[in-house]
Image: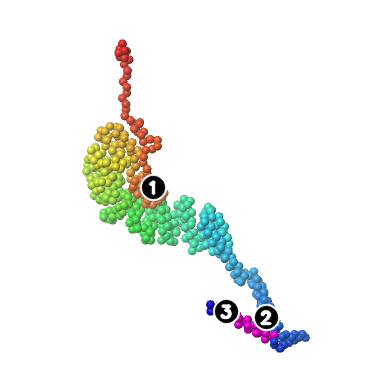
Amino acid sequence: MLWSLLRILFFVTLVLVLAFGADYLLQADAVMRVSFAGYEISLRPLPLAIAVLLITLAGWLVMKVLGLVVAVIRFFSGDETAISRYLDRDRERRGFQALADGMLALAAGEGRLALIKAQRAQSYLDMPALTGLLTAQAAEVSGDTAKAEGAYKALLADPRTRFVGIRGLLNQKLAEGDKETALKLAEKAFEMKPRDAALQEVLLKLQSGAADWKGARATLQAQARAGVLPKEVWKRRDAVMALQEAKVVVDESASIEAQEAAIAANKASPDLIPAAAMAARSYIAKGDKKNATRVLKKAWEARPHPDLAAAFAEIEPEESPDARVKRFKVLTAIRPEDAETRQLLAELSIAAEDFPAARRALGDLAVVKPTQRSLAIMAAIERGEGGDEATVRAWLSKALTAPRGPQWCCDKCQAVHSAWGPTCENCGGFDTLSWREPNEVSGPSATGAELLPVIVNGPKLKEPEPIDLEAVGRRGN
């Protein structure tokens, strides 16, 4: 408010001063005479003041025109001038506008429009890092892979954008399925930014697919240092890679306690089961049955598994079925209520032809939680006890549509594998196989194919006896 009042007062004062000055000049009687080359000019004060102002304005205009002419000459000669700076600012404004429009078009999924805007921004701006990146991404969205590859390669020349270029080429090679080149690019990018979590995951997957377990363990170590993986997960995955790298979990210098700790690092991780089986077989090959038994017992405590039972059987391959039942009590006594333990004990009893013991061991498992394996065991028990064929075939027909039971399943794509591996053969995921029941829906098929064994192998009917025609004739008479 005060500032506005001061401005009004200043304006009024200025008008008054100018008015008094003009009035003074009009009333003044002085005359200025100028003689030049025989001419004489007489000017009163007011016309003189106006003439001075006009001459000053004309001189200023002449200087500006001369400056413009000089600037034009310098502009065409290549020197920096106000004209060039003005044009540069205009080009920069147009370039940034095109860059912004291209980014908006790219976010909207309009690849062709984004590519056009990127090319326009590239013609206006001297910023290859920004315009090149926009060109590459716009070309990818529009499906022009060749142009995108060229743009990413151009980014390699600048140290500031070299990582972006390598990352872009890496994604392209992954999309093309060129895993060999992608692995080399991932390793180069990893050297530049070893703490990039997404890059670590891509490199680990590529190294696992190429069976480069030594490099994969180094990448896994980098993940652990970066805090990407929990300590327990890192230990488990490192054990998996060690198993694949050397085909054995333990080394010559490790103690049995260290071996057991490596196998039981995470009891909820079934991927350690193959490691335990491999460790036990390495002890068996050395004749160290005691440590082989200890390793398998430790793993069985974590989770009973058929592979562990198979390795335990290899400790005494020549023993009799009755002796095997007794020796396996070391395992079956650990988790007696587990389904795997009950089925294992039933199979051992069947091999020893002790079918009542097999039935007791299996219990109601075939009824409460039927699987193909438990139903097949029940059919074997029925046959061993002398049951009729119809009952045996009934159990077998149920097994056709029963769930398969625990399998090696990929937690990522749900694919079922016959044997454990460090990577999923279907989706390529690393450390995704777990021992569990697959996601499946059981039930009778629409065609009733599960009844085929019963129909084909059904009870044989008695053949009719031949008719004695002579006897019939005698009865008729």
The overriding secondary structure of the stretch rendered in magenta is helix
Can residue 74 be seen from the camera position used here? yes
Looking at the image, tell me whether mark 3 or mark 2 is earlier in sequence order: 3
Position of residue 257 measured from the top left corner of the image (x, y, whole percent) = 26, 55
Can you tell which of label 1 and label 2 is closer to the viewer?
2
For the question of whether residue 148 can be seen, the reply is: no
Q: Describe residue 84's horizontal placement relative to residue 240 as left or right.
A: right
- Tell me which numbered mark, 3 or 1, is placed earlier along the sequence: 3
Residue found at the very far bottom of the displayed protein: 30
Q: Is residue 426 above or below residue 22?
A: above
Q: Position of residue 81 (x, y in %)?
A: 61, 71
Q: What residue is shown with label 2?
A: 53
**Disc 1: CA contacts within 10 A as few (<14), some (14-19) or many (>=20):** some
| Horizontal arrangement in the rendering, residue 103 relative to residue 423 (left or right) | right
Tag 3 near tag 1, CB within 8 Å: no
Q: Which residues are magenta?
A: 8-26
Residue to which mark 1 is pinned: 414
Amino acid type, residue under disc 3 in the picture: Arg
Q: Give the quarter of the figure containing the C terminus.
A: top left
C-alpha distance separating marks 3 and 1: 81 Å
The answer to if 418 sits in the magenta stretch is no
Task: State the colouring used for the structure image.
Answer: rainbow
Residue at the spot of label 3:
7
Q: Amino acid at mark 1?
A: Gln
